[in-house]
Image (cartoon, rainbow, N blue to C red):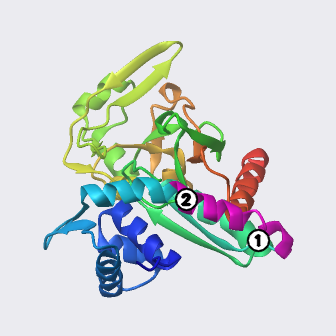
Amino acid sequence: MSRPSITDLTAFVAVASHRSFRRAADELATAPSTLSHTIRALEARLGVRLFNRTTRSVAPTQAGLELLARLKPVLGALDDALESVAGFRGEVTGAVRINAPRVGAALIVREVLPLMAARHPEVSMDIVVEGELVDIVAGGFDAGVRLVGSIPRDMIAVPLTRPMRFVCVASPAYLDRAGSPKTPEDLKTHQCIGHRLPGGRLYRWDFERNGQALSVDVTGPVVLDDEELMVEAAVCGLGVAYVVEAAAAAALAAGQLREVLSPWLQATEAAAVYYPGHRSVPSALRAFLDIVREVSKAG
């Protein structure tokens, strides 16, 4: 039996990790049909079925799972070996793939990418905006962006921001019509724009003043899972929104929104970039993290 190529084995690991020809093809920058042909040729060469396929799903067989478990560390070690000579090239090259919520992605684009482009023009940045907390390793990402409290404990976190405030905001027209809430309990008589978390439950609005903490379950005419849309809904006069201050900053500055309940809203968690701690850091990701640290200190 002839030995499969590294390209064939990399294709197998991508499909097995994503359990999707389409997502694996996106990662490898090839067509799903080409990837399917590669996998069939690999199965024929090995004489073993590696995947069970239906029209809607693909999953590794027991043989596929065994091969995946053995190949991932081998290919990881190969990547590490190649990366170890990267410094001798005299420039940083490669790609960095990031998973982030919309607000975090905006911070990266605004604060970090201009410096990356100026200092490391050979590095390609690929940012996927996703509200749900995902497994960045299984998803093929180099790093993610989330609030510190939601980052898995086996990851290494690099601060991106100082602790951020959540704010309650509403349009001037809404407040003129409904009045301004004076305490969090007043929100129960207001129209509030709900925030649905990735798991499906509604987010409770948390407040604190002089050591007194309150959590309020709110109701209203609309529930959304995207902070930019929540801000837009508030601008349109649909009610009070509870969002990270950065998401509402532009609308507040433009006078499209007003902040309410300010004394009850304190700085809470910082956002951070996080990455797996059990593998070596490629030069492109290391350069990105260095700039994140620089931006965080400057902020």
In the image, residue 65 sits, relative to residue 94, either above or below, namely: above
Kindly report the secondary structure that dominates the magenta region of the rendered protein: helix
Taking depth in this image into account, of 59 and 175 the one nearest to the observer is 59
In the image, residue 274 sits, relative to residue 181, either above or below, namely: below
Q: Which residue is mark 2?
A: 74
Q: In terms of image quadrants, where is residue 270?
A: top right
Q: Which residue is mark 1?
A: 92
Residue 247 image position (x, y, % from top left): 49, 53
Q: Amino acid at mark 1?
A: Val
Task: Judge the density around disc 1: few (<14), some (14-19), many (≥20) Cα neighbours within 10 Å.
Answer: many
Q: Looking at the image, is mark 2 or mark 1 nearer the viewer?
A: 2
Q: Is residue 48 left or right of residue 111?
A: left
| Visible residue check, residue 251 | no
User: Is 76 contained in the magenta span?
Assistant: yes
Mark 2 vs 1: CB contact within 8 A: no
In the image, residue 288 sits, relative to residue 205, either above or below, namely: below
- Give the residue drawn at x 79%, y 67%: 85
Residue 232 image position (x, y, % from top left): 37, 59
Q: Which residues are magenta?
A: 73-90
In the image, residue 283 sits, relative to residue 195, either above or below, namely: below
Q: CA distance from mark 2 to mark 1?
A: 24 Å
Residue 123 image position (x, y, % from top left): 68, 74
Q: Residue furthest front?
A: 1
Q: Label 2's element? A: helix
Task: Judge the density around disc 2: few (<14), some (14-19), many (≥20) Cα neighbours within 10 Å.
Answer: few
